[in-house]
Amino acid sequence: MGVSCNSVMKQTTRLTRLFVLLTALFLGACTQRYQSPVAAEVKSQALNASFGGLDGQVVQLAQFRGRVTVLLFFATYDLSSQIAARRLDDFYHAHQPKVNALGVALEAPRNVELVRAFGEFIEMDYPLVMMSRQGSDIFSKEIYSVPAWVILKPDGSIAASLTGAPSLELLEKTVRQAH
């Protein structure tokens, strides 16, 4: 009386799904709304950061002004970043064209192909860019863990910061407050 390969695969699949579900629930529970220590005068200024596009072109934050912009700072190796990237994609589809979304990879420039593969695997429909030294300087007080979210007002100033994998409801509330 042996164990069939199919029953082992079904059990493994169930355990994997359970693990992913529990991880998502845990990350959702650990999501924090974080108000950064950035001085009020800096938060009220439009940010002029630029990032490296995956195609080698420079992407300016100024291109996104006029609408609320949701920035997701992520790492390809991080499970919570993967969940957050998928969540932002769902949010982006539900709210475009009223809201901009931009994924910012916290990876070395040599990892452009890894970031591109990450975006394809997660099926991200919003633009992906690589963090630049200038972006790192500007957002250094906003990003202290991954994934990190920065919500920009239509004028380009910072409205709020979040960490973890916030619920769609929290994202919607935060974006509404940024208008």
Image (cartoon, grey):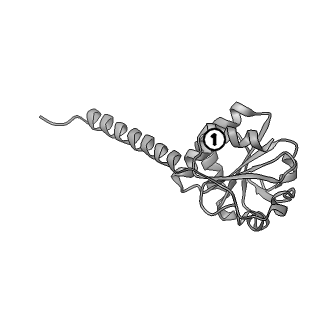
Residue that sits furthest to the left in the current view:
1
Q: Residues within 10 Å of mark 1 (few under 14, many from 20)?
A: some
User: What amino acid does circle 1 point to?
Assistant: Leu
Horizontal side of residue 167 vs 127, given as left or right? left
Q: Is residue 136 shown left or right of residue 166?
A: right
Q: Is residue 176 visible?
A: yes
User: How far from the left and from the top, in percent, is residue 43?
Assistant: 81, 59
| Residue lying farthest to the front in this orientation | 40
Q: Give the residue drawn at x 81%, y 47%.
A: 153
Outermost residue toward the top? 94
Quarter of image, res 12: top left
Q: Quadrant of the C terminus?
A: top right
Q: Secondary structure at mark 1?
A: helix
Give the camera-side residue of 60 and 123: 60
Q: Position of residue 124 (x, y in %)?
A: 65, 41
- Total marks placed: 1
Residue assigned mark 1: 170
Q: Where does the N terminus fall, quadrant-wise?
A: top left
* Closer-to-camera residue (30/12): 30
What residue lies at 50% left-to-right and 47% top-to-bottom?
29
Instruction: Left or right? Give the position of 158 relative to 75.
Output: right
The picture places residue 127, in percent across and down from the top left corner, at 74, 46
Pick the front one: 6 or 84? 84
As displayed, is residue 145 above or below residue 69? Answer: below
Tell me where residue 21 appears, x and y as whole percent: 44, 40
Q: Is residue 124 visible?
A: no
